[in-house]
Structure formats: C-alpha cells, structure tokens
Amino acid sequence: MNDKVCMSKVNEIPVRGNELFRVFARFEFALKDAGYFKTGSKNAVEADWDSFANKCLGVDFYNQLKVSGDFSIIFDVPLGKQIVNEDGVGWDKAKLPADVQSLFGAVRRVRNNLFHGGKSDQPDSDRNDELVDCAISIMICALRKCESVRWSFEGRY
C-alpha cells in the first residue's frame, strides 16, 4: 500500500483564495467588534452581515457598486449554489443580488463555496479567480464606507 497522499488538488484554489480567507475572517471579527452581531444557537455570537449592510451601507452603496461596472461578475452572472438533488450533491444558480443585503450574501457565498469545498471541480471554475477578487474588493469598499468596522478591521481600538 502506498502511504503517500497526493496533495496536488489542495493547491487548486483561486490565486487570492488564501487572501480571501484572511480578509473575510478579519472582516467578521470587525463586524462583531463594531457591534454588528447577533446571537446564534446556544448563545453563540455571529456576525450580523445583514444589519451591517442595511444600516451602515444601504442602497447608495449597492447602487454605486452596481453602476460602476467593476463588479459585473457578481451582479450579472448568478453564482453557483451547492444543492442536494437526485444524483447527490449538485449545482443550482443562486439569485442575483437585488439589494445591499443580498450583495453581501453573494460575497459570503463566494467564501463559503471556496471554504466548504464547492470550488473544486464545479461549474464556476473558469471564473473563480475573478469571483474571489470581486468579493475581496467589495469588502474593501465597504470598509472605506463604514469607519467603525474599518477601525476594528485595522486594529485601531
């Protein structure tokens, strides 16, 4: 028996995939630190992305990003969403972001698909690098708009 495990597939993630994990993790910390949190099951704290999107950013933020054209990969082409179907695990298309809250839902989907293995051998593989770049850019734009979250993100307490 060959005991060596082939690790080649481990490296098949988007170029900035590691950066997305780091930015996302720090962003979630900053949301909670800035007061955008909610209680989950068994009193576990969760980042409240929806409250942040709606209260701190709002419709103007959504409209600015949408009309800029820089984020069309998120606004114009539905993201893949893993589902269970008659064949086991498959793919469906998520709804396009229609507001700032669903825009951040798309950012989370990019991260979740990558982190939970959905970016391996899946239909969006030809655009994974662009999706990851876009998700990072949207979070950076949000940090520029919301000072309290930015300060926590940057460690300025």
Image (spheres, grey):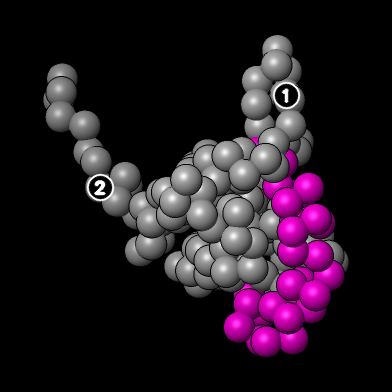
Residue range corresponding to the magenta coloring = 47-73
Q: Is residue 60 within the magenta segment?
A: yes
35 vs 92, nearest the viewer: 35
Q: Is residue 79 within the magenta segment?
A: no
Between the residue at mark 1 and the residue at mark 2, the CA separation in whole angstroms equals: 37 Å
Question: Identity of the amino acid at label 1?
Answer: Gly
Res. 55 image quadrant: bottom right
Question: Identity of the amino acid at label 2?
Answer: Ser
Residue 138 drawn at (x, y percent) = 59, 67
Residue 85 drawn at (x, y percent) = 75, 38
Q: Choose the circle earlier in sequence order: 1 or 2.
A: 2
Judged from the image, the secondary structure of the residue bearing numbered disc 2 is: helix
Q: Are marks 1 and 2 in contact (CB under 8 Å)?
A: no
The image's mark for residue 40 is 1
The image's mark for residue 8 is 2
Give left or right: position of 55 versus 135: right
Give the quadrant of the N terminus.
Answer: top left
Magenta stretch: dominant secondary structure: helix
Circle 1 or circle 2, nearest the eye:
1
Residue 24 drawn at (x, y percent) = 51, 50
99 vs 2, nearest the viewer: 99
